Image (cartoon, rainbow, N blue to C red):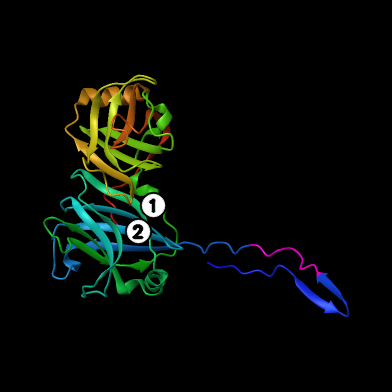
Amino acid sequence: MLVSTTAGIVTLAGSQAQAHDPGPAPTAAAPAAPVFLAADLRGRNEVPAADPDGRAVAVVRIQGNQVAFALAWRGIAAPTASHIHLGAAGMNGAVKVAFFGGALPANVNAVTGSVTVADQTVIDAIVANPAGYYANIHTSEFPGGAVRGQLRMLKDPVDLQRFVTMGSLVSVMSGDQEVAGGDADGHGVGFVRANNGRVDFGLSWSGIAAPSAGHIHVGAVGVNGAVVVPFFAAPGGLPASINGIAGTVTGVAPELIRAINHNPRGYYTNLHNAEFPGGAIRGQLFRLRSDFDNDDDALSVD
């Protein structure tokens, strides 16, 4: 957005130049309020129809040239890409906004992220006519698209972080908590819900390179320990546009789940990447008074 101002006006009266005070400089216009869009994705909406078991939800926040996204899915193989395409219902069209490209770990079921769109006309066209565009998710089984849904405008804002938030165990991660020193610019938050032989997790981060792994380790503050719950592994790093993921680890021993719930501060979460293979950011788990109940059965946005 360009804001122009006039610094002053000079007039000539006879032989004297008179400078007139223009008064207070105008303030810059506030950024436009964000616009929220959503889509309910189904396999039957793809052209031709794709994964019959697949369903997903996408929420998009647009502000300026920044497009933030949140996706959650079930009943499909690991996503390999996700986009906004041009095209009304029943029509295929070109990719207009690429959310991410690159295979995700199989146990991940939600992501958040953000991309910058250089062409403002693309943004303006999507906002003006959401129904003329669709979001979809691609997989190796359905490389042309596994699930798809037309975009629609939302009346109310949506907190995209809710897609990666659950449980009552939380960690606040930073590079300075790593024993050997991690990424000084790095910060993140971890969420854990551990019960019934499974650990549901949500992770978000900023200021670090693409994570290649995330875990729960046993260990008090200042002590390194063994991995006890491997959240995910992405040897080549997650797609760079992603800044949060959620997923599930199954087959976790009941004794370990009891131990984590009984003494969460004796365990820590961390994220690793190529720059800091020993750990970029870390934080001890602790229990909140309230539970972030992220209902993964509700794959819809009103």
Number of other residues with Cα within 10 Å of mark 1, as a class: few under 14, some 14 to 19, many 20 or more: many
The magenta stretch is 20-27
Q: Is residue 208 left or right of residue 29?
A: left
Q: Callout 1: helix, strand or loop? A: helix
Residues marked 1 and 2 touching at CB (< 8 Å): yes
- The residue identified by callout 2 is 59
Between 156 and 134, the residue placed more toward the observer is 134
Instruction: Tell me the number on the disc at residue 160.
Output: 1
Q: Callout 2: helix, strand or loop? A: strand
The image quarter in which residue 216 lies = top left
Q: Residue 26: within the magenta? A: yes
Q: Position of residue 11 (x, y in %)?
A: 80, 77
Q: Position of residue 211 (x, y in %)?
A: 30, 40
Query: Which quadrant: the C terminus?
Result: bottom left
Between 88 and 234, the residue placed more toward the observer is 234
Who's the residue at 32% across and 41% down the image?
Answer: 202
